[in-house]
Image (cartoon, rainbow, N blue to C red):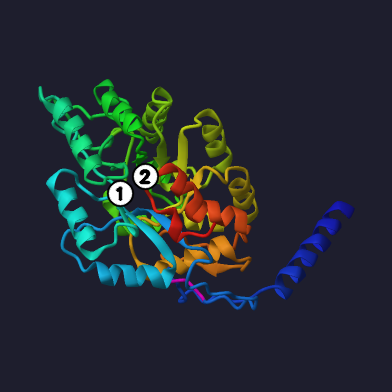
Amino acid sequence: MKKIGLLAILAVFAWVLHAQGRYEIDTSLHMDWELYDPPSTLVVPEHEVESAKFPFVDIHSHHWRMAEQDLDELIGQMDTLNMGIVVNLSGRGGPALKAMMDNVKKYGYEDRIAIFTNIEIRSIDADDWLENTIKQLEYDYDNGAKGLKIYKSQGMTHTDSSGQRIALNDPRLDPIWAKCGELGIPVLVHSADPPSFWKPHDENNERWLELKLRPGRKRSADDPAPWETIIGEQHDVIRKHPNTTFIAAHMGWFPNDLAKLGELLDIYPNMNVEIGAVIAELGRQPRNAKRFFEKYQDRILFGKDSYQPTEYPTYFRVLETDDEYFPYYKRYHAFWRMYGLDLSDEVLKKLYYKNALRIVPGLNAEIFPE
């Protein structure tokens, strides 16, 4: 009887607690997660940075119509941002690159605009492919090309005559990497995409919204290969060609794992990285990222990728200030807030221009400090 009485008392006690905390839930209220983006109520110091503290080289930009575009307008935008030199990675090569260089010379902006060339690998099986590609590289170099850009399609979707994917570490490409080393020009190489594109498209994927809005970016182990395989092929090329300087686009897709990226930089002294399109990853780990930039300050270059002048100030703010909890400009890339790294002047100068001046031949150092 005592046991039954004790259970009754406990039941009543639990009911009382439940009654005191009971509330009605309005089940008619629903919020679409994609729309939920309330302005922060946090009141903290804010420092909008419209132009970079030091003149900078944008090592990763694309200007497809440079042969006929108004370069005065471009330079005017660059001056507003304090951009000393823009590197157009979309030079195409051959007559197309020469036409771009001719337009640059016509406007007199050889010191402000640099162009990288591109090559075609889908004809790799042709008997004269290697000879013609080497000739094109030499022709482009003679016409002012400062480097070679490799697109992500080269290594992902481009196939040879048998329909096989052409991996970047395909031995047939080795003479190209060696030739760049011989000419003293860097290879800026974009391999794969963020690893999240290979993950299940579910509630555990940070790129869920991006993959919904851009479903063509979704990948799988056989479309065209596992992420680890494609990235590994890039590293194999860098390993096999120590006399060629490589710049891994988008921090080699390791901006969210800087410890791993540091290991790669330690292994491959001819590997460098640029920060295009990954500033949101850096801004959510300010202390860790700052330590990384300090340790590898001679190996990181400034890059933006998509040329949108209104987006550069976010990069400047992350790199230069100690601001807290501010948004990225594309929510489908980053739904989180960012924090400033507050990099030192010494590190900023290397990131903004010193490393690029050392790695890319023929850039005019006189337009930069020191």
Indicate whether 253 appears above or below 228: below
Q: Secondary structure at mark 2?
A: loop
The reply to whether residue 34 is visible in this rendering is no
Residue topped by disc 2: 193
Q: Residue furthest right?
A: 2
- Magenta stretch: give its range: 33-38
Residue 170 falls inside the magenta stretch: no
Position of 49 relative to 139 (above/below): below
Mark 1 residue type: Arg
Of residues 17 and 100, which is closer to you in this image?
100
On screen, residue 267 versus residue 323, left or right, reads left
In the picture provided, is 194 more to the left or to the right than 261? left
* Residue 35 located within the stretch drawn in magenta: yes
Furthest residue toward front: 366
Give the Cα distance between marks 1 and 2.
8 Å
Q: Where is mark 1, residue-wise?
A: 217
Which one is closest to the eye, mark 1 or mark 2?
2
Q: Mark 2: which amino acid? A: Asp
Which image quadrant: the C terminus? bottom right
Asked whether 366 or 345 is in front, the reply is 366
* Residue density around tag 1, few if under 14, some if 14–19, many if 20 or more, within 10 Å: some
- Asked whether disc 1 touches disc 2, contact meaning CB atoms under 8 Å apart, the reply is yes
